[in-house]
Every structure is written in C-alpha cells, then in structure tokens.
Image (cartoon, rainbow, N blue to C red):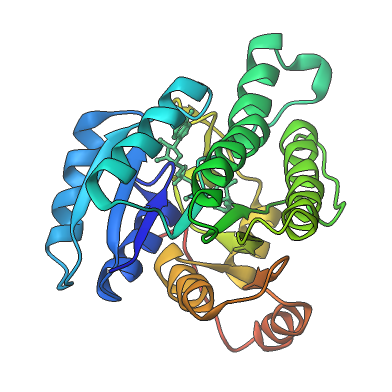
Amino acid sequence: MKTVVITGSARGLGLCMAKVFRKNNFNVVISDLKEENLKKAAEELLDIKGEGKVSYHICDVTKSIDIEELINFAVTEYKKIDIWINNAGVNQPDKALWDLSEEEINLILNIDLKGAIIGSKLAMKEMMKNHQGAIYNIEGYGSNDAMMLGLNMYGTSKRAVTHFTIALAKESEEKDTGVIVGRLSPGIMITDFITNALGNGEKINLPERTKKVYNILGDYPDVVAEFLVNSMINNTKNNVKINWLTNGKAAWRFMTSGFNKRDFFNK
Ligand SMILES: NC(=O)c1ccc[n+]([C@@H]2O[C@H](COP(=O)([O-])OP(=O)(O)OC[C@H]3O[C@@H](n4cnc5c(N)ncnc54)[C@H](O)[C@@H]3O)[C@@H](O)[C@H]2O)c1
C-alpha cells in the first residue's frame, strides 16, 4: 500500500487531496499547525471508504525539526513515503511592500518558499534511501510571472517555488536519485486562503472585480483535488507541471460566462 504525506492539510486543497488519496487506498498522513483541526480532518477522512490508514502529525513547515519529525513519524508508521506534497501556504495581506512588516514578509517567505524548500530537501533525502518517490510543490499567483499590487511577496515566493522545483527535478535526474519532482498548478480555488491573509484571521476584502474573475475562473478545491491527485497517481515522469486551469479552459470559462453564471460569494 502506498503512502502520501501532505503539509498544511487540515483544510482546503490539502485536505481535499488527502480525501482523494484515501479513496484510492493510500495510507494518508495529514499535518498542520493545530491538533484540534487535524483531529477533525482525520475524522472526515475516516468517514471515507478506503483500505489505507489515516494518521496526523503536527508540523509547522517553518521549523525544519517539525518537518524531520513528520518524516520520521510517517516512516515509522508506514516504512516509506511514496508521495510528499509541500502544500502549506499563506496569502499576503492586500498591502504594498512598504506597508508590510518585516514579520509579515518573513512569514510569507518562510511558509510559502522556505517551507517548500526544506520539505523537498528532507523528503528527497528520505526517498533517496529507497531510490523511489515523488515530491510535488504547489504553484500559485506569480509562478508564471504575473504581477498584481498587494501580491508582491506571495508572487515572489511562488515564482521562486517554480524555479526551485524545476531546478530540483534536474538535480534529481542528474544525480539519478530515483525520485521524481513536479509542480501542481491548482488555478483559483474558493478556500479560506483567498480571504484570510497569513492564515491568522486577518481578512482580505476582495474588490468586486476580483470576485467577478474568481466567479468565472474559480473552483471549489474538491474538484481541483480530484484532477491533481488522479494525475499524480498516474504520473511516472520527472519535472511535470500538472495544470488545472489551462489557458484553453480559462478562455472557455470567459467565453461561456454570460450564460454560465456562478456566484461563490453570495451563498
Ligand atoms: N486558494 C487558491 O486560490 C490558491 C491558488 C493557487 C495556489 N494555492 C496554493 O495552494 C495551497 C493550499 O492553499 P489553500 O487554498 O488550500 O489554503 P488554505 O488556507 O485553505 O489551507 C492552507 C493550510 O496551510 C496551513 N498552514 C499555514 N501555515 C502553516 C505552517 N507554517 N505550517 C504548516 N501548515 C501551515 C493552514 O493551517 C491551512 O490548513 C497553498 O500553497 C496556496 O498557496 C491556492
């Protein structure tokens, strides 16, 4: 039986991906900041039929010791890790760079970028022992060099995550580690993330024009997770980008938005 470990998976995309892995009979290890959220998420996972086991472990991805302990926990429980997903992430408060505190800048970079780097490094070291495994990092706004006021630090992190992940895939291939490395591009998802900056309850008030775009291009995370997880399960190639919101899909959504009305914000 295969094992997946996902960071930041007590809610949102991480939990939705965990549910699809569970349906596909993986052992699933979820991890996040707070035990009470993990406990609740684990109960939701156990309500889904699956032949694998479900476990949770607290892990703050800004602390390498936590990531190390998460790996040791998963390996002790399940012997090896087949898929590792650096999913934990926070959004940026809607502020220009000069209005962000140093603490806010550190938090965004430490979670969104360094968390993925250290998670990848430590997962890679573990997987290399068995000459097998797959590591995925999550792209986001900025990965393709898009820029927007109020998203400088988030975009910088995600742009760097993209560079880092491609570079790691190449390193892995050159060193013949046996580990594949890829990127997940989930598009726009209607999760707490889009209105909750830094994951600490600081609200972002979305402008009406942004809501309009989200209504056209956005999806609930369960829909996106189904696609991403099925693609990961079937993927054997290194350096892939698994992309939900392709240019073609986005163009189709805009073309059909006149008669395909969706409203995620006034439910
Ligand atoms: N929602 C979107 O539109 C969108 C779009 C593109 C990419 N993404 C990316 O997808 C991933 C998941 O986002 P989501 O929408 O599910 O967000 P979410 O806010 O619903 O979930 C993020 C999870 O990460 C956890 N987390 C925050 N800081 C952490 C830390 N230091 N250590 C461990 N866990 C931590 C949170 O507690 C939360 O459970 C993120 O990497 C995000 O950047 C989201």
Coordinates of residue 63 in the picture (x, y in percent): 50, 21
Q: Is residue 247 above or below residue 165?
A: below
* Residue 135 at x, y percent in the picture: 57, 55
Q: Quadrant of the N terminus?
A: bottom left
Image point (56%, 50%), residue name: 128
The residue at 64%/27% (across/down) is 108
In the rendered structure, the answer to whether residue 100 lies left or right of residue 123 reads right
Q: Is residue 263 visible?
A: yes
Residue 10 visible in rendering: no
**In front: 129, or 141?**
129
In the figure, is residue 200 to the left or right of 216? left
Res. 67 image quadrant: top left
Most extreme residue toward the top, as rendered?
Answer: 102
Q: Could you tell me which quadrant the C terminus lies in? A: bottom left
User: Considering depth in this image, is 264 or 181 the residue closer to the camera?
Assistant: 181
Q: x, y percentage for residue 130?
A: 48, 55
Count of all numbered marks drawn on residues in the image: 0
Q: Nearer the viewer, residue 253 or 27?
A: 27
Q: Is residue 218 left or right of residue 101?
A: left
> Residue sitting at 75 percent across and 53 percent down?
175
